[in-house]
């Protein structure tokens, strides 16, 4: 069972879904229908229930975090993935807002310096947009690369984080 809610945010629309352990998916998109469709595709065997309680107050906290990123969001998470993906995602969560790393640097950080493609795959498999900040990973030359939720959103997130750090 995944309970979910959809709301407008500064990056378009956000869908947050939670199972009995916590947030299991956060998707960004251009419209609610495509977000619902993506949720059904990612969790084909789950029972999905749209709720009107903002997931018990989790969704407004998430939207505030998207608008004003902090170092870490303290919400219950339900993170599922391989051991390698888990290591990559935990390393991503340790990157401070306003900083970026290359895929190669992230691979080295998780103890697998030759696993650059696998690191990129773990970033692509991330189901928790912004909370697991795969937007903080850039190419070795510093340029932006793909982002499941759109390169423009990635650019906006990075600029927002850099300006908050500069203002602090």
Image (tube, grey):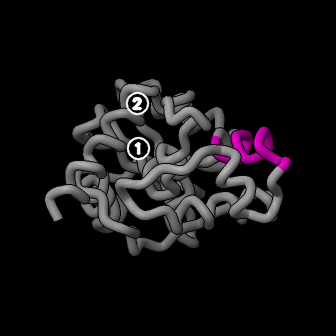
Q: Residue furthest front?
A: 141
The C terminus lies in which quarter of the figure?
bottom left
Q: CA distance from mark 2 to mark 1?
A: 8 Å
Q: Which residue is mark 1?
A: 15
- Residue 116 inside the magenta-drawn segment: yes
> Residue at 80% of width from left, 54% of height from top?
113
Residue 69 highlighted magenta (yes or no): no
Quarter of image, res 160: top left
Residue 148 seen anywhere in this rendered image of the structure:
no
The disc placed on residue 145 is none
In contact (CB < 8 Å): disc 2 and disc 1: yes
Coordinates of residue 96 in the picture (x, y in percent): 42, 64
Q: Is residue 147 above or below residue 92?
A: above
On the image, which quarter does residue 64 sit in? bottom left
Q: How many other residues sit within 10 Å of disc 2, few (<14), some (14-19) or many (≥20)?
A: many
Label 1: how many Cα within 10 Å (few below 14, some 14–19, many 20+): many
Which residue is at 42% across, 54% downward? 99
**Label number found at residue 29:** 2
Q: Nearer the viewer, residue 81 or 135?
A: 135
In magenta, the rendered stretch is: 114-123
Foreground mark, 2 or 1, reads 2
């Amino acid at each position: 069972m995944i309970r979910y809610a959809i709301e407008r945010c500064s990056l378009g629309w956000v869908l947050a879904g939670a199972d009995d352990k916590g947030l299991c998916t956060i998707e960004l998109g251009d419209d609610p229908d495509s977000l619902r469709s993506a949720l059904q595709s990612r969790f084909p065997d789950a029972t999905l229930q749209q709720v009107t309680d903002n997931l018990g107050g989790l969704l407004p906290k998430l939207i505030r975090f998207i608008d004003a990123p902090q170092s870490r969001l303290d919400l219950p998470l339900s993170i599922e993935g391989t051991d390698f993906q888990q290591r990559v995602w935990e390393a991503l969560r340790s990157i401070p807002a306003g900083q970026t790393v290359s895929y190669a640097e992230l691979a080295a950080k998780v103890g697998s310096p030759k696993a650059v493609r696998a690191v990129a795959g773990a970033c692509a498999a991330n189901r928790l947009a912004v909370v697991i900040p795969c937007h903080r990973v850039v190419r070795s030359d510093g340029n932006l690369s793909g982002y499941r939720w759109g390169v423009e959103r990635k650019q906006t997130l990075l600029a927002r984080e850099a300006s908050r750090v500069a203002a602090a």
